[in-house]
Image (cartoon, helix red, strand yellow):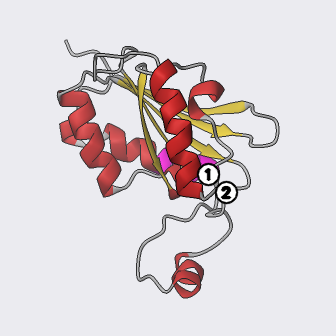
């Protein structure tokens, strides 16, 4: 059986048994930005269920222009007020440079490599907190997920000051 045939067969079983979630708004008003790494089961790792959070995945779990675009919609249209930025151990973007990744891939892109998780999380959280059109955000947390133990390290928290 080919990969595509396997996927289509699995989808038939899923479609018969899937949970019905009618609302596009995440019921926990939460968005999670994390890496595309196949070892991360975001919903299981964070104790979430279908319909509770938006999950935005990219290489490294970094805040990119496309993440900002998605969060603009999540916050203003779909009620998100809390964001978790979750990087992970043993990430392919850790300990490499943009130049090395450009050479390796042949793509002239910024890959957002990670030298230090705390510094990268602080940079991304500062960007989210200081982006004017993301003013509906009340809480942002920065975690590092350990892919071997399944545990979270809670590294950074930001909360918007209440307006007076």
Residue at (63%, 49%) from the top-left corner? 38
Residue at (35%, 41%) from the top-left corner? 128
Q: Which mark is residue 46?
A: none
Is residue 142 rendered to the left or right of residue 95? left
Q: CA distance from mark 1 to mark 2?
A: 8 Å
Q: Nearer the viewer, mark 1 or mark 2?
A: 1
Where is residue 94? Give x, y as percent. 66, 62
Residue at (40%, 44%) from the top-left corner? 126
Where is residue 162? Give x, y as percent. 28, 15
Label 2: which residue? 91
Where is residue 163? Give x, y as percent. 22, 16
Residue 72 or 124: which is nearer the viewer?
72
Residue 120 or 57: which is nearer the viewer?
57
Farthest residue in the right direction? 149
Please identify the dominant SS of the magenta region.
Answer: helix
Range of residues picked out in magenta: 117-123
Where is residue 37? Give x, y as percent. 61, 51
- As helix, strand or loop, the secondary structure at mark 2 comes to loop
Residue 12 or 126: which is nearer the viewer?
12
Label 1: which residue? 37
Name the quadrant containing residue 114.
bottom right
Name the quadrant containing residue 133.
top left
Query: Mark 2 and mark 1 in contact (Cβ < 8 Å)?
Result: yes
Tell me if I can see residue 85 in this picture. no
- As helix, strand or loop, the secondary structure at mark 1 comes to loop
């Amino acid at each position: 059986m080919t990969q595509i045939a396997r996927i289509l067969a699995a989808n038939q079983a899923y479609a018969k048994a899937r949970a019905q979630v009618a609302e596009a708004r995440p019921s926990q008003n939460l968005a999670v930005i994390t890496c595309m790494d196949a070892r991360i089961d975001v919903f299981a790792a964070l104790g979430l269920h279908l319909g509770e959070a938006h999950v935005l995945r990219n290489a490294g779990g970094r805040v990119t222009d496309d993440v900002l675009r998605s969060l603009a919609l999540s916050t203003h249209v779909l009620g998100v007020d809390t964001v978790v930025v979750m990087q992970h151990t043993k990430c392919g973007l850790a300990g490499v440079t943009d130049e090395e990744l450009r050479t390796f891939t042949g793509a002239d892109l910024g890959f957002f490599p990670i030298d230090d998780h705390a510094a990268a999380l602080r940079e991304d959280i500062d960007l989210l907190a200081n982006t004017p059109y993301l003013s509906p955000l009340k809480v942002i947390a920065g975690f590092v997920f350990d892919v071997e133990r399944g545990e979270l390290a809670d590294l950074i928290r930001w909360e918007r000051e209440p307006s007076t």
